[in-house]
Image (cartoon, rainbow, N blue to C red):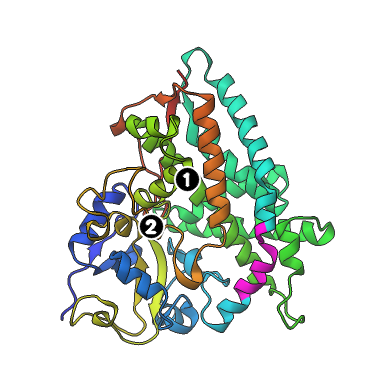
Amino acid sequence: MGQPRPLVIDPTGRDIHGEAARIRERGPVTLVELPDGVPAWAVSSPELLKRLLTDPRVSKDPRQHWPRWINGEIAPEWPLFTWVAVQNMFTAYGGEHKRLRSLVSKAFTARRTAALRPRIEEITTGLLDRIAEAGQDGRVVDLREEFCYPLPIGVISELFGLPEEQGAELRAVVDGVFRTSATPEEVTDNYARLYAALGELVALKRRSPGDDLTSALIAARDDDGDRRLSEQELLDTLVLMVSAGHETTVNLIDNAIHLLLTHPDQLARVRDGRTGWEDVVEEALRVEAPVASLPLRYAVEDLRMSEFGGPDGLVIAKGEAILAAYAAAGRHPDKYGADADRFDVTRVDKEHLAFGHGVHFCLGAPLGRLEANIALRALFGRFPHLRLAVSEGELEPVESFISNGHRRLPVLLS
């Protein structure tokens, strides 16, 4: 089967779900063109994607399995450079992935996550107090700015022992990692600022270790007791965990609020106890995947899609890149039916891939769910008359085809 003409991905992400629909229309696997003309295979079938995500013939390590990286064709100015260049469990393969994930798992424990609940509740209450004051006398409040952003930043700061004065810079550079429409100059500047900020944090924790994840990662050793994260692995692990624990949770809370405000019948079900907040979180993750498309994976050898339940004759060749099209998969009618685009908290099948699948399943998924559950319950309990301050058409997406959220979420409290 000949390769189809690639679908050019819009780096601004202006129409995430329109683009996701176009990807699905071209079949379960289709060729797309990423920024700067870089080709990749977008996989939108949930079942096919799950099989690929668990197959050892699919790698996330460009240094071993992506000829474009190996041959020096990927420049530091590429908008997705950080996603590919990092050396952590996100881009590791095989035994190296197992080693890195094990080291991180020793630090990022269920106990540490559970212990954060009181602090998350405290941060949430403080933010709602500020929102109540800001929204007095009919003033508009931007919930993304005043709630969806500062809550995860506060939790991340608590988790990693980040000094309060570094919070603004951390937010700015993480936003930059996800901004796929950035110019080459913005990409390289953000990359330098990102590592400067995390380098300062590591230096601080080496001088004054505490009961925080950064200190735990610095101290973590493997099962043999003689290997720690290298300096680059440590910094890149912080890049992964801070960005994954920040932007994705911001988008989850943002999208869930927006969905409830635009679906009052669904909100009513939750308010009167017919449906739980957990159902809201899972359905929001399905219908509005916080990460719309995740770069990148690579074929370790030729992959015949028929072996995975895909189209006969279609082969992803050795060394070709693969894009996990989570937004497209989350609304796939083959799995969720003709109303797959509809937000429905009573939907029986809410299974989704928003946190990934297989060995690379997101370690921070329990924390993201916990934050969203606490945030939504508290927000709608505090402000029962909350409503959007603008029409649906006035809401703008963030400038990214990876990050799926709104630039602003203006609301009125009554």
The magenta segment? 100-110
Q: What residue appears at the point 37 percent right and 38 percent down from the top-left corner?
A: 259
Secondary structure of residue under mark 2: loop
Q: Is residue 331 visible?
A: yes
- Tell me where residue 386 appears, x and y as whole percent: 44, 24
Relative placement, left or right, of 310 versus 90 is left
- Three-letter residue code for mark 1: Glu
- Residue 103 is a magenta residue: yes
Q: Is residue 194 left or right of residue 279?
A: right
State whether residue 4 is above or below residue 370.
below
Magenta region includes residue 3: no
For marks 2 and 1, the one nearer the N-term is 1
Mark 2 vs mark 1, CA separation in Å = 13 Å
Whether residue 167 sits left or right of residue 61 in the image: it is right
> In the rendering, at what x and y percent does residue 60 appear?
46, 75
Quadrant housing the C terminus: top left
Is residue 48 shown left or right of residue 399? Answer: left
